[in-house]
């Protein structure tokens, strides 16, 4: 199938550019434009009654679709928010931060979590254990050992690490290694959702899972979600009126009430435009039988084609030897190259940009992301060729 037909708007707007940043900002399919207009029309039609309409129609449909993608049994355990950080902090608000708290995580978590946890660690009662992700071959065992040794209150780790693309395959084993039933377990699934096949079926009663649509779900910012463990009765201190939606007309009792499903972790008023976009994208995929497996197969084939072309360039810096994750079976939807320094990486990224090859970088690591709109013909690395003086 010619997948580029779904992205004519973004492709035309970026004609002449090679965009390798879909691990950060994926092109939106054309159907998302109609979805935004549909949101406006429904808002005009229902006005203040739109909230009830959203929770009766839009939300249940998305819950079912997402639950199927991450393989959980109770769609009603999916809750939405504008960003994953809001959901993360709502989960963390279930901890008594005035007490001694130990957190076991890694040295490769996204900036929002790293910033937040570093800020909390300014308090003497918060202890952060950061497990290096490399060497990758021993990560699972080292991470489990840290959990066992420190008996943490919170375990937080990514399914796919944002700064390398390394895929943690043993989600079940890590979650099942946590012996303390009161320990909160949170999986950051942002670089795995809609990119790599995901099944939470064996751990859905134990782990929180966070993700959203800004990257591989292709619907842009503002549509994030969490899977809440089945049967969870926690009462987040950071809470909003959506967490009690459907009971607002009932008499108030002395205690703050919560929904009995995943909505107990909901917040408050938000713009649902992004959820309309997400629904449109997931409907598009369903209509065209585009499963996560099919998307992954396409992207990994494009990665191989890119690397083959790169081999022919014989570039001094960008080579297979510089790949952080060389085993494609353990790699997400972007290639990460480790260069000599942050300065060298920035210089190369800017040189590539000058030739309309758009990438991004983190420190000394340069990243190339790939998506459905990439084809073999799309890739032109002639600016990197051995006898070229361009880069």
Image (tube, rainbow, N blue to C red):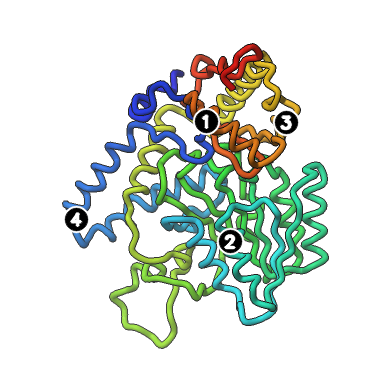
Residue 128 position in % (x across, y down)? 71, 66
Q: Which corner quadrant holds the C terminus?
A: top right
Spatial separation of the CA atoms under disc 2 and disc 3: 28 Å
Q: Could you tell whether 219 is left or right of 41 in the image?
A: right
Q: Quadrant of residue 124?
A: bottom right
Q: Nearer the viewer, residue 135 or 382?
A: 382
Residue occupying the point 55% across, 66% down: 91
Q: Secondary structure at mark 1?
A: loop
Q: Nearer the viewer, residue 176 or 383?
A: 383
Name the residue carrying label 4: 46
Q: Residues within 10 Å of mark 1 (few under 14, many from 20)?
A: many
Spatial separation of the CA atoms under disc 2 and disc 1: 26 Å
Q: Which residue is farthest front?
A: 389
Number of labels in the image equals: 4
Residue 53 position in % (x across, y down)? 27, 56
**Residue 6 seen anywhere in this rendered image of the structure:** no
Q: Where residue 322 is drawn, which disc sits there?
A: 3
Look at the picture and state if 345 lies above or below 377.
below
Residue 71 position in % (x across, y down)? 57, 46
Q: Are marks 3 and 4 in contact (CB under 8 Å)?
A: no
Q: Which residue is farthest bottom?
A: 254
Name the residue carrying label 1: 20
Residue 208 position in % (x across, y down)? 59, 59
Name the residue carrying label 2: 115
Q: Are marks 3 and 1 in contact (CB under 8 Å)?
A: no
Spatial separation of the CA atoms under disc 4 and disc 1: 40 Å
Instruction: Name which of mark 3 and mark 1 comes first in the sequence.
Output: 1
**Residue 248 seen anywhere in this rendered image of the structure:** yes
Instruction: Name which of mark 3 and mark 4 comes first in the sequence.
Output: 4
Q: Secondary structure at mark 4?
A: helix
């Amino acid at each position: 199938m010619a997948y580029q037909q779904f992205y004519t708007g973004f492709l035309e707007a970026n004609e002449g550019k090679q965009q390798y940043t879909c691990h950060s900002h994926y092109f939106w399919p054309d159907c998302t434009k109609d979805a935004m207009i549909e949101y406006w029309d429904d808002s005009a039609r229902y006005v203040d009654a739109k909230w009830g309409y959203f929770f009766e129609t839009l939300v249940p449909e998305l819950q079912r679709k997402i639950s199927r993608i991450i393989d959980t049994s109770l769609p009603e355990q999916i809750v939405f928010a504008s960003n994953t950080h809001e959901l993360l902090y709502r989960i963390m608000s279930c901890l008594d931060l005035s007490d001694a708290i130990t957190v076991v995580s890694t040295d490769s978590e996204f900036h929002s979590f790293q910033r937040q946890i570093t800020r909390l660690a300014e308090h003497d009662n918060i202890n952060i254990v950061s497990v290096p992700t490399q060497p990758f071959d021993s990560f699972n065992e080292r991470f489990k050992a840290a959990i066992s040794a420190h008996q943490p209150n919170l375990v937080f780790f990514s399914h796919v690490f944002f700064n390398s693309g390394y895929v943690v395959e043993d989600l079940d084993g890590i979650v099942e290694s946590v012996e303390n039933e009161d320990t909160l377990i949170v999986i950051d699934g942002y670089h795995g959702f809609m990119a790599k096949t995901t099944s939470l079926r064996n751990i859905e009663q134990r782990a929180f899972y966070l993700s959203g649509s800004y990257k591989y779900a292709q619907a842009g910012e503002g549509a994030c979600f969490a899977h809440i463990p089945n049967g969870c009765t926690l009462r987040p201190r950071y809470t909003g009126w959506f967490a009690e939606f459907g009971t607002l007309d009932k008499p108030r009792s002395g205690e703050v009430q919560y929904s009995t499903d995943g909505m107990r972790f909901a917040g408050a008023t938000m713009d649902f435009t992004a959820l309309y976009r997400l629904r449109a994208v997931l409907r598009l995929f369903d209509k065209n039988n585009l499963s996560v497996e099919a998307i992954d197969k396409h992207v990994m084939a494009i990665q191989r084609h890119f690397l083959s072309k790169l081999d022919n360039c014989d570039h001094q810096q960008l080579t297979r030897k510089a790949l952080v994750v060389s085993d494609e079976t353990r790699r997400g939807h972007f290639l990460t190259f480790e260069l000599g320094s942050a300065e060298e990486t920035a210089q190369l990224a800017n040189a590539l940009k000058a030739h309309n090859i758009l990438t991004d970088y983190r420190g000394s690591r340069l990243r190339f992301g790939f998506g459905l709109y990439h084809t073999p013909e799309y890739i032109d690395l002639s600016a990197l060729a051995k006898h070229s003086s361009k880069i």
